[in-house]
């Protein structure tokens, strides 16, 4: 953690942070009713900053447990004067369950979650049936779940788990994955993979009106 990131956590988190354990009211949090995107595991927050600056009429909530990354995002929010982002610094599973109202999210982004490549660690992957059920509960009908991953076995894992969720329709147009969506910013983790020659799977699902 750099001294600047530590200062950001001390001074800016009270302004941008949301407390864990309490259900939020997005209209009260942002002072308006607007389309809401949730990014889970935002890393250093590059994608959130880019989207929030590009879409000022939308609101954004990020969840990240890695404090230097949170500090990095806070510094960028301050530098660019961005006001449509709020942050949880707790475990995403808990935040989803306890803090995000049902049918409140228009879009969920899960970009390059920890891959846990070893077979015995696959159960630690965040994409599991209960996680998918939570996302189905939190998204509005017609809402979008956008996952990206640069590890083929995890892409297959995502497709397998999502195939058992009747609330979602896979919106692939080209085999299994969607073409790289121009609307999604490239992330820090993705760039690392690109340097290693990894390909990327963008998996986009629509929450059906069930
Ligand atoms: C591989 S990194 C990718 C970060 C970023 N999305 C990117 O593409 O650069 C995965 C991130 O998810 C965060 N993370 C993993 N599990 C989490 C959880 N249960 N709740 C919140 N964040 C989590 C990690 O701290 C890490 O920053």
Image: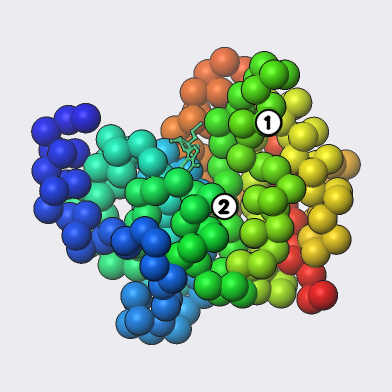
Q: In the rendered view, does 159 fall on the left or right side of 147?
A: right
Looking at the image, is mark 1 or mark 2 nearer the viewer? 1
Q: Is residue 80 above or below residue 64?
A: below
Q: Which residue is drawn at 74% across and 26% down?
A: 152
Q: Is 210 or 152 nearer to us in this picture? A: 210
Mark pair 1, 2: CA separation? 21 Å
Q: Which of marks 1 and 2 is nearer the N terminus?
A: 2
Vertical position of residue 58 compared to residue 165: above or below: below
Name the colouring of the figure. Answer: rainbow
Pick the quarter of the image with the C terminus: bottom right
Determine crowd level at label 2: few under 14, some 14-19, many 20+ residues with C-alpha closer than 10 A. many
On the image, the x and y values in percent for residue 10 come to: 13, 48
Q: Is mark 1 within 8 Å of ligand 1?
A: no
Rendered image: mark on residue 123: 1
37 or 201: nearer the viewer: 37
Quadrant in the rendering for residue 160:
top right
Q: Mark 2 points at which residue?
A: 109
Tag of residue 20: none
Q: Tag 2's secondary structure?
A: strand
Q: Can residue 45 be seen in this view?
A: yes
């Amino acid at each position: 953690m750099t001294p600047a990131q530590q200062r950001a956590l001390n001074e800016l988190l009270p302004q941008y942070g949301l407390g864990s354990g309490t259900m939020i009211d997005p209209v009260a949090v942002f002072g308006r009713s607007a389309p809401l995107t949730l990014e889970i595991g935002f890393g250093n927050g590059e994608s959130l900053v880019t989207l929030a600056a590009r879409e000022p009429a939308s609101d954004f909530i990020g969840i990240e447990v890695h404090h230097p990354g949170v500090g990095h995002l806070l510094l960028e929010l301050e530098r660019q004067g961005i006001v449509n982002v709020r942050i949880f610094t707790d475990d995403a599973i808990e935040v989803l369950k306890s803090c995000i109202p049902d049918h409140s999210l228009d879009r969920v982004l899960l970009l390059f979650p920890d891959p846990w490549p070893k077979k015995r660690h696959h159960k630690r992957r965040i994409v599991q049936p209960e996680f998918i059920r939570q996302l189905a509960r939190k998204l509005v009908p017609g809402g979008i779940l956008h996952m990206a991953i640069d590890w083929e076995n995890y892409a297959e894992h995502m497709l397998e788990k999502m195939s058992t969720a009747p609330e979602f329709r896979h919106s692939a147009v080209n085999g299994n994955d969607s073409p790289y969506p121009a609307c999604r910013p490239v992330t820090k983790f993705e760039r690392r993979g690109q340097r290693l020659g990894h390909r990327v799977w963008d998996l986009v699902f629509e929450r059906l009106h069930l």
